[in-house]
Amino acid sequence: MSESVIARTGRALSREELAARIARDLWPGATVNLGIGIPLLVADHIPADGSIAIHTENGLLGMGRAATGEEIDPDLIGAGKGYTTAVPGASVFDSSISFGMIRSGRLDVTVLGALEVSETGDLANWYVPGGRPGVGGAMDLVSGAREVWVATQHVDRAGTPKLVRQCRYPLTGRGVVTRVYTDLAVFEVRDGRLVLRELAPGVGADEIAAKTEAAFVTDLSG
Amino acid sequence: MSESVIARTGRALSREELAARIARDLWPGATVNLGIGIPLLVADHIPADGSIAIHTENGLLGMGRAATGEEIDPDLIGAGKGYTTAVPGASVFDSSISFGMIRSGRLDVTVLGALEVSETGDLANWYVPGGRPGVGGAMDLVSGAREVWVATQHVDRAGTPKLVRQCRYPLTGRGVVTRVYTDLAVFEVRDGRLVLRELAPGVGADEIAAKTEAAFVTDLSG
Amino acid sequence: MSIDELPTRAAGPVSKACGTLREALAHVRSGATVAVGGFGACGTPIALVEALLDLGVDDLHIISNNCGQDGRGLALLLKERRIRKFTGSFPGAAFAEHFARGEVELELVPQGTAAERLRAGGAGVPAFLLATGVDTAYADGGVPVLMDAEGRLVKESEPKQKQEFGGRTYVLEEALRPDVALVHAHLGDEAGNLRFRLTARNFNPLAAMAALHTVAQVETLVPTGSIDPDDIHLPGAFVDRIVIADAPLGDADE
Amino acid sequence: MSIDELPTRAAGPVSKACGTLREALAHVRSGATVAVGGFGACGTPIALVEALLDLGVDDLHIISNNCGQDGRGLALLLKERRIRKFTGSFPGAAFAEHFARGEVELELVPQGTAAERLRAGGAGVPAFLLATGVDTAYADGGVPVLMDAEGRLVKESEPKQKQEFGGRTYVLEEALRPDVALVHAHLGDEAGNLRFRLTARNFNPLAAMAALHTVAQVETLVPTGSIDPDDIHLPGAFVDRIVIADAPLGDADE
C-alpha cells in the first residue's frame, strides 16, 4: 500500500489502508501480536521474509499467512482460531510460555482493536455490559507488551467518538495505550496525554477536533 | 540381597544390606529420588524392569544403572554428578519441571542421608557449621516428596547417636521425616513421634535404647 | 481430593494404556473439577469430553480456555446441563446462551493468568503475583458471575486480593489444582509420555501437570521406550491413563 | 538494565549468529548479574564463561547451580577474583576456598527455588510463594553470607519474608532477572531457536528466559528453518546471540 494510493482516496482510510499505515511503523526484528479485526490485516502488509515475527498467544512465534486449501492443518491455528501457516524458524510452545514471553518483555508491540480509548491511554475493548462475557488474552497483552497500539475507526457507526475523556466500558488496562491509529489520524500517548501526531491525507485538524471527545495536544512535527 | 544373607551377618547391616532393606519397601509404580551415599545404593536393589522409576532432580525420570565404559555420555548424569543411563520410557526436562514434579506430589519417596534426625521427625543433613556451604535439592525434596525416608548409620563414628531429641545442626526440614532406616533398626514417625518398628537380625531392643538419644515408642507388630 | 489421597501412580513398565474411554475415565466423578486442554477446536480432547456425556457424569466445574466450539465437546455438556461452573478466558457463544438463562456460573480469567494458575498448580506453587488485570473489573470486582433464569445479573465477581511488591500493585493469584485433567496429544507411550503437535499443545501440558489425576487421549499410542527422551514434551509422571482417541466407549459391565 | 532499556531483539531472518565469542559476549559488562546454565560440568557454557576471563569482565554476580567444576569455567573466574557474589544451591569445593578467605559473597538458595525464581523471571511473575525451606535457616536467617580474610563469619542471611496462604506459611520468593544469561545447547539455528540434549538441559532454558540478554553457545549451528517447530525446546525469542562453542575468541580490534 503506497503513500500515493492513500493520498488518492482523499478520505478516511479504509481498513486495509489503516493496516498498511500501522505496518509502516514496525521494524525488522520486531515481535508483534495482532488482535482480531483490523490488527490482523497488518500481517498482509509486513515483509514476507519473516523479518517481523508474528506471535499468536495460543502458542506460535512466526505465524505466516492464512492457510488455504491444502495448506490447512487443523493443528495450526492463530489466536483468532483461523487456520494459519508458520514461517521458517517458527516455534511452538505451551500457553504458559506464550504468555510468559508477553509478560517478560519479549513482545515489542501488540496491535489491538478498541471500544474506547481515554485521553490518558486507558483502553476498553473486552466487554460490552450485557453482552457475551469473554476476555481472552487482551488484559495479558496490554499489561505485558512493550508497546500497545490501538487500531480503530475514529468514530463508531453512530458517529460517536471512540477517543473519549474517560472510558464508559469496562477497562482492559489503565494507561496502557502508547499509540492510536484511526482512519483519520495517528496519536501518541506521551506522559499520560494524548498527542495528535499525524493526519490522514486530506483530513484537517478541525475534523479531528470535532470528532474527538478526548482532550489532546497537537504535535505534527516529524 | 536376600533375608538369609542379612541374618547370617548377625550384626549391624552393611551399607549394601541397608540399601537392600530399604528397596524391599518400595512398590511397583513408585517414583523415587535417591540422595548420594547409601540412598543411591538402593538403585542396585530394585527391579531392573523399571517398575520403580528413579527421578534425579537435575532433570531425568527413569534413571538406570551407573554408566561404564562406552555407555558413558557426558550429557547424561545423575544428581550426584556421576554418569548414568536411562531406562526405556525415560524422559528429560528442565530444572523447573523437575522440582515442580517434586513439589506437586509426583514424587512418592525421597531417600536421604542424615546428620541427625529428631524424635519429632526433623531432619538435619545439609550443613555442618564452619564447613562448605551447599544445600542442593535437599530442602526441596523433604518439603515436596510424599514420603521422606532417611538412610543412616544408627550412631556416628564417635558412637554418638544420630537419632536425637532435638537437632543441633541446622535443619533441612521440620517434622518432614516419615521413616528412618538405620543399620540397627527401622523407625516410623507417627503423629510426630518416633516409633521403633523393626530390629536388624540379632539386634536387641536394649541395644537400640542404649544407642538412641531420641525418645521413641516401640511397636514391633507386623 | 487432596494430594494425600492421590492414588499411587504407575510408572516404568506398568502400562497406563486403557482399551476403552470408559476405562480411561473411570476416576471422573460427578461434582469434580475438570481441566480440559485445547484452544478452540485445536488440541481439544473431544472423545474424552463427549464420553463424559455417556458416562452420566454431571455437576462439573470445567477449567478450559473455551467452553465448546461448533456445538462439539463442552458445548454438548453445556446443552445437557452437566456443567455447574466454568473457569476460563473466552467461554464463547454456546456458553453465553446458557449463562444468560442462569444455567451455569462463570469465573472469567485472563488467558495468560489461567495458563499460569494451571502451571503453578503443576509446579507446587500455591500462589503468585501478576500485574495482569490490575485496575480492571477483573481485579476490582464486577465481572458477571451468575444470571437468573430471566437473564438478570444476580452475582458479580468480588475484588481480588492485591499485594504490593517492589513498589507496584499486583493481583495475588491462586494455583489451580483440578481433580482431573482431560488432554489431547499427538503421540503417547504406555508410560504416559506425551508429544503434542504445533498449536494443539496450548493448555494441554498445563492441565495435565495441574491435575491430581490426568487422562490423555492420543492419536497414536506406542510402546514405552519408543519416544526419544529429548522428544517427550510432557513426562509420563504427569499422566495417569492413556487411551487412543478413537477407542470405543466400552460396556458398563466390562 | 531495565526491560525498557533492552536492545531491540532480532527475529525472523535477522541472524543472531556470531562468528566469535567476543562478538557474542559484546553486551556483557563488568558489574553485571549473569545467569549461567549447567549442572556440574553437564550443559555448562564453558567456552562463553572462560571467554569472560580474556575479555577482562569482572565484579560479576553469578547465578548458577554450581560455581565451577574440576577447575574449569566459573572456578577459573573465582580464581581470578572476577566474581563478587554467587547465587545458587551448591557452590562447591573451589568456591568454599575463596569464600573462606572472604573473597566472594554467597546467596545460598535451594535448587528448586533457584530454578523457580529464574522461571518466574522469564514468565513475568515478580514473586511467588513456596513451602521449601520454611522452618530452616534459609527462611529464618543465619546462612553464611560473607567471611573475612581470616575465615571469620562476618555476615549471615536475614530472615525472608513469610506469607500465610490457605492456612499455611510460605516464603515469598522473588523472581530473578539477570542482565545476561550464558547457556549451552546441543543445536541452534540462526534465529536463536535451541534444542538441548538429555540432562544437559537443566537450568539452561530457565536462565535464558530469565535474562534481559541471552547468549547461547551451541555444538551445531544450522540455518533458520532447519529445526521442526515441535523439536524446538526454547523459542528464539529468548535468545539474542548464538555462537558455536568452539568458535575463536576473536580480536579486540575487529
Image: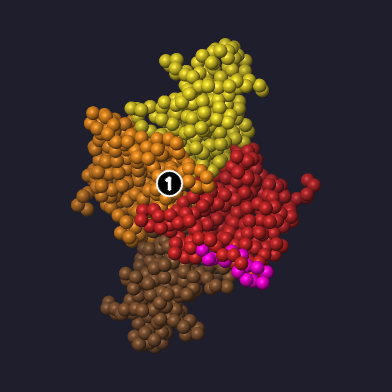
Chain colours: A brown, B yellow, C red, D orange
Determine the secondary structure under disc 1: strand
Residue drawn at 37 percent across, 48 percent down? D176
Can you give x and y, in whole percent of width and height, for residue B5 in the image? 59, 15
Name the residue nearer the viewer: C191 or D59. Answer: D59
Magenta: predominant secondary structure element?
loop
Name the residue nearer the viewer: C145 or C154. Answer: C154
Name the residue nearer the viewer: D29 or B213. Answer: B213
In this rendering, the count of numbered labels is: 1
Residue drawn at 36 percent across, 35 percent down? D142
Can you give x and y, in whole percent of width and height, for residue A171 in the image? 46, 69
Taking A152 as reference, is A91 above or below it? above
Taking A199 as reference, is A29 above or below it? above
Say whether residue B190 is magenta: no
Q: Label 1 is found on which chain of the structure?
A: D
Q: What stretch is highlighted in magenta?
A: C141-153
Can you give x and y, in whole percent of width and height, for residue B72 in the image? 46, 33
Q: Quadrant of the C terminus of chain B?
A: top right
Amino acid identity at mark 1: Leu
Q: In which quarter of the image is the N terminus of chain B?
A: top right
